[in-house]
Image (cartoon, rainbow, N blue to C red):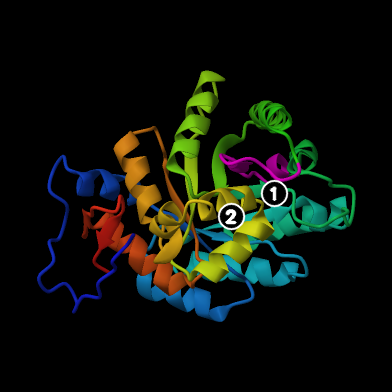
C-alpha cells in the first residue's frame, strides 16, 4: 500500500528516477497523465492552475443535470489557462440533434476543442435520439465541426450490463465509423483495480488489431468508502467484491486510498499504454500532487507489492 509522505518543497528528494529502474518505468507511464474536472466546480480549475502542468489534457466530466453552457465555459476557461480541454459527451443526456449540433459548435468555436470523449451516459432512458456513443458518431456532427479525434470508452474489468462480446463488437463498429469520418480514435478506460485484468484486456485488444492509443483509468487518492461508492456507481463492483473477499489484497490496493499497486503492476508488465487517466474522486489537487510525484520518480517499491510515494 502507499505510504505517502509529505515533503517540504523539493528538499531531500531526487529530481528524477534512477535510469532503468522501477521508478523510471513508473515515471514514463505517468508522464503526460490526464485527469478530469467538473464544470460545476470552480475549485477544480483553481487546483489545475496550482498543481497541473500547462498543456495537460483535462477532461470535463458529464453528469446528469449538468448545464451545457457551463461545460462550454469550463472548456473555454481551461483553454485560456493553457490546458487542452477534452469534454465528455453523454449520448443519453442530449435532447436533440439540434442541441448536440449547438454544443459541438460552441465547444469548437468558443473553446478551440477538437477532441471529445463519447460515453453513453448513465440515464435509464435517452433524453433524445442518441442511445449510445455510436449514435453520436453516426450523426456526423463531430466531423462537421472539424473535431480531429474521438475518445471511446474501454472496460478492462467488464461492464455491469453489457456482455464482453457485445462490448467488443461495439468498439469495432465505433472504430470503423471514426475511420470513415477521418477521426483519430483513442480509448480511455473505466477506472480499474486489477493490473492483471488490464494487461489481459490490452493483449486481447491488440490481438484484435486495435491500434488506437489507450489511457488506463485510475481512481485517484480517496478514502475507501468513496472508492467503493464510485465503483458500484460506475460498474466495477464485481472487482471490489472480489477484492474484499481477500482482505490483504484489498487493503494493499485501496486501503491507503491510492492505486499504487496497480501502477506498479502496470509499470512492471511493460504493456503498451499511452498514459494514465485519473478520476479525482478525492479531489483534483490531491490527485494531481500524487500523479506529479509519480512522474518525477519520487517513489520506491515496498514489500507489500505497492509503492511508497513522496507527495
Callout 1: SS: strand
- The tally of labels here is 2
Q: Residue at x 43, y 64 (%)?
A: 255
Give the magenta range: 142-161
Question: Which image quarter is the N terminus in?
Answer: bottom left
Residue at point 69% right, 40% down? 143
Residue toward you, 73 or 256: 256
Q: Which residue is mark 2?
A: 113
Q: Residue 76: within the magenta?
A: no
Res. 161 image quadrant:
top right
The percent position of residue 42, horizontal first and vertical second, equals: 56, 80
Q: Is residue 47 above or below residue 117?
A: below
The C terminus: image quadrant: bottom left
Q: Can I make out residue 296 in this image?
A: yes
Q: Identify which residue is drawn at 62% across, 65% down.
A: 229
Residue 139 figure quarter: top right
Residue 304 picture quarter: bottom left
Q: Is residue 145 magenta?
A: yes
Residue lying at 58% horizontally and 41% vertically, measured from the top left? 157
Answer yes or no: is residue 281 visible: no
From the viewer's side, name the closer residue of 246 and 48.
246
Check disc 1: other Cα within 10 Å, few if <14, some if 14-19, many if 20+.
Answer: many
Q: Earlier in the sequence, mark 2 or mark 1?
A: 2
> In the rendered image, which residue does mark 1 sit on?
119
Q: Residues within 10 Å of mark 2 (few under 14, many from 20)?
A: many
Determine whether the residue tagged by mark 2 lies in a helix, strand or loop: loop
Residues at marks 2 and 1, CA–CA distance in whole angstroms: 17 Å
Please give left or right for residue 22 compared with residue 204 in the image: left
Q: Pinpoint residue 52: horizontal percent, then vertical percent.
A: 38, 66
Amino acid at each position: 500500500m502507499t505510504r505517502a509522505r509529505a515533503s517540504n518543497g523539493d528538499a531531500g528528494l531526487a529530481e528524477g528516477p534512477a535510469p532503468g529502474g522501477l521508478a523510471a518505468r513508473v515515471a514514463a507511464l505517468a508522464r503526460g497523465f490526464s485527469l478530469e474536472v467538473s464544470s460545476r466546480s470552480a475549485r477544480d480549475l483553481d487546483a489545475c492552475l496550482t498543481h497541473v502542468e500547462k498543456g495537460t489534457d483535462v477532461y470535463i466530466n458529464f453528469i446528469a443535470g449538468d448545464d451545457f453552457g457551463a461545460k462550454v465555459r469550463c472548456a473555454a476557461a481551461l483553454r485560456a489557462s493553457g490546458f487542452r480541454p477534452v469534454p465528455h459527451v453523454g449520448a443519453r443526456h442530449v435532447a436533440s440533434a439540434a442541441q448536440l449540433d449547438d454544443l459541438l459548435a460552441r465547444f469548437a468555436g468558443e473553446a478551440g476543442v477538437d477532441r471529445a470523449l463519447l460515453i453513453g451516459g448513465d440515464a435509464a432512458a435517452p433524453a433524445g435520439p442518441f442511445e449510445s456513443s455510436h449514435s453520436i458518431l453516426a450523426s456526423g456532427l463531430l466531423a462537421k465541426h472539424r473535431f480531429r479525434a474521438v475518445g471511446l470508452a474501454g472496460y478492462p474489468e467488464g461492464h455491469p450490463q453489457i456482455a464482453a462480446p457485445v462490448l467488443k463488437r461495439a468498439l469495432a463498429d465505433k472504430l470503423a465509423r471514426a475511420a470513415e469520418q477521418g477521426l483519430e480514435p483513442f480509448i480511455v478506460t473505466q477506472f480499474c483495480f486489477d493490473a492483471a485484468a488490464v494487461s489481459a484486456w490490452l493483449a486481447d485488444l491488440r490481438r484484435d488489431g486495435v491500434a488506437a492509443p489507450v489511457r488506463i483509468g485510475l481512481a485517484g487518492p480517496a478514502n475507501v468508502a468513496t472508492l467503493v461508492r464510485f465503483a458500484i456507481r460506475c460498474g466495477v463492483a464485481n472487482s471490489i467484491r472480489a477484492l474484499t473477499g481477500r482482505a490483504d489484497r484489498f487493503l494493499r490496493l485501496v486501503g491507503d486510498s491510492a492505486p499504487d499497486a496497480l501502477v506498479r503492476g502496470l509499470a512492471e508488465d511493460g504493456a503498451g499504454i499511452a498514459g494514465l487517466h485519473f478520476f479525482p474522486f478525492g479531489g483534483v489537487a490531491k490527485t494531481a500532487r500524487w500523479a506529479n510525484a509519480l512522474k518525477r520518480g519520487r517513489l520506491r517499491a515496498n514489500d507489500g507489492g505497492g509503492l511508497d510515494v513522496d507527495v
